[in-house]
Image (cartoon, coloured by chain):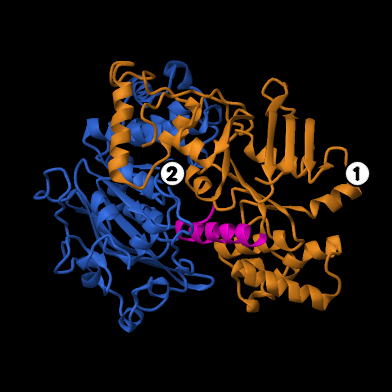
Chain colours: A orange, B blue
Amino acid sequence: MNGPILEVEHLVKEFPGGRRGEVVRAVDDVSFAVAEGEVLGLVGESGSGKSTTARCVMRLIEPTSGRITFEGNDLMDASRSRLKRLRRGMQMVFQDPYSSLDPRMRIEDVIAEGMVVHGTVRGAEARRARVAELLELVGLRQDHLRRRPSDFSGGERQRIGIARALAVDPRLLVCDEPVASLDVSIQAQILNLFKRLQRDLGLTIIFIAHDLATVRHLCDRVAVMSNGAIHEIGTREQIYSAPTSDYTRSLLAAMPVPDPEVERRKAAARRARLEPAGSAGEAGGGDAPTDGGGPTAADPRPSLPVSASGGAG
Amino acid sequence: MSTVMRSPAPVRGQESEEPLLDVQDLTLQFHARHGLVRALNGVNLTVRAGERVGIVGESGSGKSVTALSILRLVRAGRIAGEIRFAGENLLTVPEARMRQIRGKEIGYIFQDPLSALNPVRSVGDQISEVLRLRGVRKAEARRRTLDMLQRVGIKDAGRRIDDYPHQFSGGMRQRVMIAMALIGEPRLVLADEPTTALDVRVQAQVLDLLWDLADERDLAVVLITHDLGIVAGFAERVVVMYAGKAMEECSTDELFRASIHPYTLGLLHSLPRVDGEVPEKLMTIGGSPPSPSALPSGCPFHPRCRYALDRCREQVPAFVTPPNGSHPSACHRAEVLAQSPGVLQ
């Protein structure tokens, strides 16, 4: 295993504006390290703090406290100009390919913007050549250069977003739910693209998702988050085959699997667990709601451990 | 044309009865600024009393429009085909009768409860509306609403009945939606992506609840989803839609083990999974789904299909059971695929 490219220590992010004016701690003492060339998955339910963690790592939002070290450089103390230089090494791919591309810009300019801002490739000709290279790398056609985002489907837009992120030759890619809004038949295309890029370019990737199946497909290591904290972190095999926490087990057990036999077995197991809890048909018996939190996404929610005997099978 | 399938899987023993809902060759077109939109291009769907049927499809495949058309909630456009519900033709019954059918005979659960619920009326008020419109007295309507809220698992229902939608979490709001759909004691519920906005653990609870309620009331459910995992757990029978067209219809077991449609097979092979081996590369379906305003000629799937022949470009395939097959599909090559069902070549 290579040395860490990114280290996050005791990261805390608090937001004002809880229900009675109290502070909401969206990220609560999170520490992890990512080795060079590794793909780390951050999984969790909505409000678990996974996206906020990613945004803090990029310093797109200011962390309340903690240390973030990227390639040996302290990001927290970095001045604006130094931060700008460091960000060349770390780029982000966003969830929504519809709102993350400026509809007025041509694709060529969307992808080249980073090169202009960072001055990495000088001269219009050289930039155009580099954009052409990037388009090919992500599987788009050269004649797409002069079009605008509205001419593209969701999957193509996500490819554009990835090309834009790669334009400044980053070592670390932070991807926030990059396939969540794509159709099933397109998701596989984009997952394969990530895998190929990671292998060919030696990229390090932090992959944030709520879908445990896509994370398993792509990630070497997985951190399971809830209530702003890392609940469990381990290799893919550890997390999916031998999870140690009840929380991880309950997530895995609830994840629908495209196999009717497995699903029937799981449903039967859920029912068997419910029966003794309360009389059938009685409200609030075993069928206890887990999402007792309020309507705001940042609300920390009580996590209800569900004992999943046998796991997800 | 009746292409009701006989499945080897343990489906309810009601094959001989007339289906509760029978949709045949439903089409819907409307004019938009950018031209003619062909939203539905031949939908076939049968649902028997008490049966749980899944409609799977990607965005733009017409699954939501199908549900809205059944309730005649699509105002614009030219609709053709047949929708029979308990002996009545829903495309021709008067609007006054249709209004009775909505809510009383057919319930509807929307994907996003926050935008489907009225933010300035209490949930109890909204749930009981169906009863009040039917002349049930206020006290009685409130009592039945309270029962319903308890049944869908709202704790402390006596207090919560006067709360407003924003005071509920996502999962609880969806339970309120379910209560609203079921309070009129319908025989059929159309549930359009009812758990898409929910976290997986809450999703499992909501689906279990829907299952239990359907079971105890002999209620038929049409569950619309893009998630094949949800279909696997919930539905007895499945219709796969693509580009506004039913592509395959079979029992859930057949769908996952013995599909004979290239699109279904492609979808199944492109799914990452939480169990089994992790493949180096996922199989993919190239390209992307067509826009309903620019459908390809012939079979709408042909530009992405590895089995496509010249005929597929020219002729729309009929939705029929191939002579060597066990269930209907819309594919010119169904006979070839039925030789080794479930296998993608």
Q: Toward the viewer: B100 or B232?
A: B232
Residue B274 badge: 2
Task: Write down the quadrant of residue A272 in the picture.
Answer: top left
Element under disc 2: loop
Q: Please give left or right for residue A93 compared with residue A66 in the image.
A: left
Element under disc 1: loop
| Amino acid marked by disc 1 | Ser
Q: Toward the viewer: B283 or B204?
A: B283
Chain of the residue on which disc 1 is drawn:
A
Quarter of the rendering occupied by the C terminus of chain B: bottom left
Task: Provide the major secondary structure of the magenta segment.
Answer: helix
Q: Position of residue B223 (x, y in %)?
A: 34, 46
Q: Please give left or right for residue B278 compared with residue A275 in the image.
A: right
Callout 2 crowding tier (Cα within 10 Å): few <14, some 14–19, many ≥20: many
Q: Which residue is mark 1?
A: A79
Residue B36 seen in render: yes
Task: Write down the quadrant of residue A159 in the picture.
Answer: bottom right
Callout 1 crowding tier (Cα within 10 Å): few <14, some 14–19, many ≥20: few
Residue ranking furthest to the front: A1
Residue drawn 16% across the image and 52% down it: B7
Q: Position of residue A180 (x, y in %)?
A: 54, 50
Residue drawn 79% across the image and 46% down it: A71
The region drawn magenta spans A181-201
A225 vs A218: above or below? above
Q: Is A185 colored magenta in this rendering?
A: yes
A300 vs A215: above or below? above
Image mark count:
2
Residue B198 seen in render: no
Chain of the residue on which disc 2 is drawn:
B
| Amino acid marked by disc 2 | Val
